[in-house]
Each structure stands twice: as C-alpha cells, then as structure tokens.
Amino acid sequence: MVSVGVLGWEVRQVKLTQGVLSDDKNENPDFYSWNHVMFAYCDGGSFTGTADDPDEVQGDKIYYRGLRNLEAIMEDLMKKQGLNKATQVLLAGSSAGGLASFIHADRIAELLPNTVQRYKVAPMSGFFLLHDNVLGESVYQPQMKMVYAMQNSTFGVASQCLVSKSPMYMYLCLFAPETISYVSSPLFVVNSMYDSWSLGCILYQMTYGRPPFSRLTTTLQKVTFICDDSRDIEFPARPDIPYSLIDTLQHCLRREPSERLSIDALLQHPFLTGEPMCEFCPHCRANGLARSSGSSSSSSSSSSSSAASAYYSSHSTTAPSSFGHDMNDGKH
C-alpha cells in the first residue's frame, strides 16, 4: 500500500500519480510500492526560511518560515498519515520543490522513523544552472541572493556547504550544483536536457524584442495567464517574420507539455531545415501559390514539400493570417 504525503499547500496542481510517483507497477517498476513524500511548490526559498520577523506587504504580514513548516509537516505525516510505519520512502519535488529535495535530502533522512529500510530522493527539474540569461544579464543569482538574506536561509541549507563558502557567497548553497556535493542520501536526479517552453520564450524574445508576457504588469497576472489554457499567447504577424518561425514558437509555447516540440522534432522542423511550407501557408493558399508534393515543381521542391508534409502530419497548428514571405521564390 502506498501513502502519499505532500509538503506544501498547492496540492491541486501537483500530479501525484505519474512518473516516479506513480503506483502503477508497469509505469514505475522501481518505486510503485514505496511511500511517496512530495515537495510541492510552496515558497521561493525551498523551505529554507527561518526569519523571526515578518515583512509587511500592502497591509499583510508575510512570514518566511519554510524550515519550520517543513519540520511541522513531517511531524504531521508521521502522526496522522502513517509515515511512522514506512519501510520504503521516496522523497521527490519539482522546480523549487526539486531544489528543496536536494537541499533537505539528508535532513528528511534524519527525521524518518527507524522502520525505514530504504530511502531514495528524486529531485525533478530542480537543477538550476548558474549562468546569465539570453541577454547576458545576471538575473537569477541576485534574486536568489536576496531570497537567502530576506528569508534568513542560513540555517535551512546544508551546513557543510556553508563552511566551504565565504560569507559573501553562502547564498550559492541555495543552488543544486553547489549543494549536491554535500548530499549523502541516494539521488535519482530527473532533469530535462532541454526545455522547449524556455526555448520558445527565448525565441519569442529574439523575434519580437520582448518576452511573451511582457504586457502583464504583475507576477500574479503572469502566473495566472500562463496557467490559463483559455487565454491565447499572441504571435503578431510581420512581413519580416517567416511563417515557419511563428509555427516553431507556437509549438514550443503550447501549455500542454506533451504537445510541445521534442528536440528531435525541432531539428526536423522546416524553420531549421529550410524546407518550403507553402502547402501549409494561409498566404500561399489565399494567393494560389500553394505547392503540393504532387505538383510539377522541381524534384528538390517536391522532396522538400514531402518532408514538410511528413512533419506536419503529426504536428498540425493554427497559423496566423499573414507572415513573412518571399513572393518570388516561395520561401518562408
């Protein structure tokens, strides 16, 4: 029997029945029968905050006590959720929760009952890299440095990591690449080699000179928009923007992850291969310029059109009504 405990408040948005958290033997043969403890995306400090005094924001008091919350919830899981009888425990988390899995792996191990015979940790998408953004700006590191100070995270991160840093750089212990060397618990790191959503955001910035959600002013507005399937992302048409590029953006920025381009599909996309897309182009169709693979065009054009047809048979999309197009040679 599998019991699932969630460390965090946003339970509804956490998929507890997939991947390493699935109780299906066929989908998750290694951990399907284990007790699963999941770090939900609770706070930006990954349960490291120990600040005594709250901040006041627009009349509301904001407390940064993530570490105390972690300890209290673990106590609750032990007393009320049956974790005190567990023999096999898998700790997991995603994004900030994945980072929390790195940071607190050994701390959780110490809190588990002596009935536990096997304990593993599977951080998901928590390995944030230390580098500048696409514009060459250092954004994430200063933000995390501020979080470290604001939440008083000194007592929430690994002490071994802290002693290896000078005071100016102790905040780096909030990053998985820095803290992983000091984790003794067995780790099964789950992290994408690529992220098509992030790629779409980068391409969007390069194409339009702004992020896809720049017109929204507050963080809450942006988070709400991103999670709302009914609200469309704008892909403004311009004469200098090829149809194949807009199509690439549309596929990378699908809200449903399974509908986004895989890296293999992206490498085969006509935007990268340079293949014509006239038969899928609304402008070509409207002006009688669409060429199918069966037309009397050159063999190279026919081959390219067939390749594009093969790609789009499994990657259909809704295209904008106008876009960049060379009226002389039909290239997009």
Image: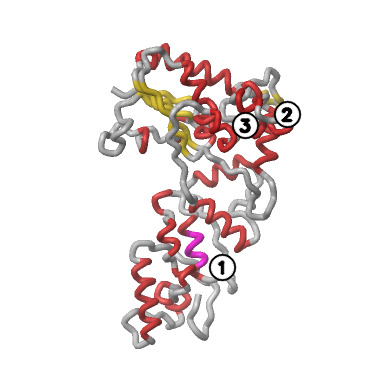
- Chain part drawn in magenta: 245-250
Q: Which residue is mark 3?
A: 173
Q: For mark 2, does the 10 Å Cα neighbourhood hold few (<14), some (14 to 19), or many (20 or more) residues?
A: few
At horizontal 40% and vertical 35% (from top left) the residue drawn is 15
Q: Of discs 2 and 1, which sits in the foreground?
A: 2
Main SS of residues in magenta:
helix
What is the distance, in whole Å, between disc 2 and disc 1 at their CAs?
A: 50 Å
Measure how far apart labels 1 and 3 are at the Cα level. Answer: 44 Å
Q: Secondary structure at mark 3?
A: helix
At a point 40% along the width and 53% down the height, the residue shown is 259
Q: Position of residue 319 (x, y in %)?
A: 46, 66
Report x, y in % for residue 147: 67, 32
Residue situated in front as seen by the camera: 306 or 192: 192
User: Marks 2 and 3, how far apart in space?
Assistant: 11 Å
- Could you tell which of marks 2 and 3 lies nearer the N-terminus? 2
Name the foreground residue: 64 vs 136.
136
Question: Mark 1: which amino acid?
Answer: Ala
Q: Secondary structure at mark 1?
A: loop
Residue 247 is one of the magenta-drawn residues: yes
